[in-house]
């Protein structure tokens, strides 16, 4: 806050503003082209979206799609869960705005640091390890089924033709959870068929990889779904057994930890061995310093905060796939997050 700025100060601030705006203009222009390595490996660079109004901003920065459409915003700041129609209207509008680009809609992820009083999640000693995300939804069909039907209905356009809406399940830890969720999805499909409501019969279904057990059985999970998306924020805190909200262990909650990067590698190997694609929607995906490693580990898609898109696309264009693989191999051989960061900064 500048109290009574003089003409010199105002001129300085105006110049800084103009420089910032010009930088934003250039970034948005650079983001509109695709991200391909010099040897032809294309990476889909998408946006994480927390509200419907963020979709146009993602497109401004050059998003190739939406890799994470958080649905919690529909459930917040209200006294009861949104209806199926309210959800359908939001998902349909997001799909319309995205056009022929992919839109990955994550089912409700509440609990942990996202309580909703009207859903009565109860008091838990450790909510991050408790009844949250898919665990909650599987036991509350009154909440989950309307969302599944709404997403299915949004998977076709006004003409009934399939669009590129995909469904993603959060915090999956076992194949049994996927099968139970897919059974509920099949029930929702049957309900819509009987009602004569159109939906995409071939809509892709994927899961988030964010707990260590999912990586340990990734080969089994890959047989149940169409894609993986790694959530590094939760994966890091669970792998390192360090609460990401606790300042005393903040140094451990670093996605550059070799243990976390090795989890990414293992998940990517399992996905590709099963013939499915794998992306990342955690904060690490939006860090250009990490791009060579993620590219080298085999990630097919990176999804991030919209303003990060141009820099990540630029990072992809700078390295061949062979160079990225060499950097990834060297990074994974190091023994600390600090060592990995120093190595990447030098590279």
Image (cartoon, helix red, strand yellow):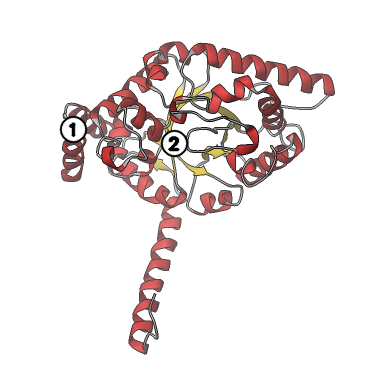
Q: Nearer the viewer, residue 306 or 83?
A: 83
Residue 280 in the image, given as x and y percentages of width and height: 42, 33
- What residue lies at 40% left-to-right and 13% top-to-bottom? 217
The extreme bottom residue here reads 7
Q: Which residue is mark 2?
A: 281
Which quadrant holds residue 88?
A: top right
Considering the numbered disc 1 on the image, is that residue within a helix, a strand or a loop? loop
Please rate how many residues cluster around mark 2, counting C-alpha atoms within 10 Å: few if below 14, some from 14 to 19, many from 20.
Answer: many
Quadrant in which the N terminus is drawn:
bottom left
Which residue shows up at 34% across the image and 48% down it? 314
Discs 1, 2 touching: Cβ within 8 Å: no
Between marks 1 and 2 in the image, the one whose residue lies nearer the viewer:
1
Residue at 39% of width from left, 14% of height from top? Answer: 273
Q: Residues within 10 Å of mark 1 (few under 14, many from 20)?
A: some
Res. 74 in view: yes
Quadrant in which residue 100 is drawn: top right
- Location of residue 261 in the rendering, given as x and y in whole percent from the top left corner: 29, 28
Residue 122, how many percent across, how many down? Answer: 56, 29
Q: Is residue 222 above or below residue 317?
A: above
State which quadrant residue 214 falls in.
top left
Evaluate whether residue 205 shows in this view.
no
Q: Earlier in the sequence, mark 1 or mark 2?
A: 2
As drawn, is 279 to the left or to the right of 9?
right
Residue 264, relative to residue 340: is it above or below?
above
Say the numbered circle drawn on residue 184.
none
Disc 1 and disc 2: Cα gap in Å? 23 Å
Residue 336 marker:
1
Residue at left 36%, top 35%?
A: 40
- Residue 334's spot in the image, x, y percent? 16, 29
Tally of marks: 2
Q: Secondary structure at mark 2?
A: loop
In which quadrant will I find the C terminus?
Answer: top left
């Amino acid at each position: 806050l500048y109290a009574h700025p003089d003409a010199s100060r105002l001129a300085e601030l105006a110049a800084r503003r103009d420089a910032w705006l010009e930088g934003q203009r250039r970034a948005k222009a650079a983001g509109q082209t695709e991200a391909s390595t010099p040897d032809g490996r294309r990476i889909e660079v998408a946006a994480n979206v927390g509200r419907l109004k963020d979709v146009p901003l993602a497109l401004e920065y050059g998003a190739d799609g939406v890799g994470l459409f958080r649905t919690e915003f529909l459930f917040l700041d209200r006294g009861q869960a949104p209806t199926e129609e309210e959800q359908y209207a939001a998902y349909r509008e997001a799909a319309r705005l995205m056009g022929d680009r992919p839109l990955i809609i994550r089912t409700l992820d509440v609990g942990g640091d996202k309580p909703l009083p009207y859903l009565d999640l109860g008091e838990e000693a450790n909510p991050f390890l408790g009844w949250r995300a898919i665990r909650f939804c599987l036991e509350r069909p009154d909440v989950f089924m309307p969302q599944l039907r709404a997403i299915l209905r949004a998977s076709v356009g006004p003409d009934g033709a399939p669009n590129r809406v995909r469904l993603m399940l959060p915090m999956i830890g076992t194949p049994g959870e996927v099968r139970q969720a897919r059974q509920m999805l099949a029930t929702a499909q049957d309900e819509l068929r009987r009602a004569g409501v159109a939906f995409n019969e071939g809509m892709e279904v994927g899961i988030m990889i964010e707990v260590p057990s999912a990586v340990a059985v990734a080969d089994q999970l890959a047989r149940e779904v169409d894609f993986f998306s790694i959530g590094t924020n939760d994966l890091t805190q669970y792998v390192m057994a360090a609460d990401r909200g606790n300042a005393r262990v903040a140094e451990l909650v670093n996605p550059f930890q070799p243990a976390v990067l090795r989890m990414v590698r293992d998940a990517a190997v399992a996905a590709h061995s099963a013939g499915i694609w794998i992306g990342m929607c955690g904060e690490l995906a939006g860090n250009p310093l990490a791009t060579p490693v993620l590219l080298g580990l085999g990630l097919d898609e990176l999804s991030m905060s919209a303003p990060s898109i141009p820099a990540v696309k630029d990072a992809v264009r700078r390295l061949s796939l062979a160079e990225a693989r060499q950097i990834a191999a060297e990074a994974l051989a190091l023994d600390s997050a600090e060592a990995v960061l120093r190595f990447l900064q030098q590279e």
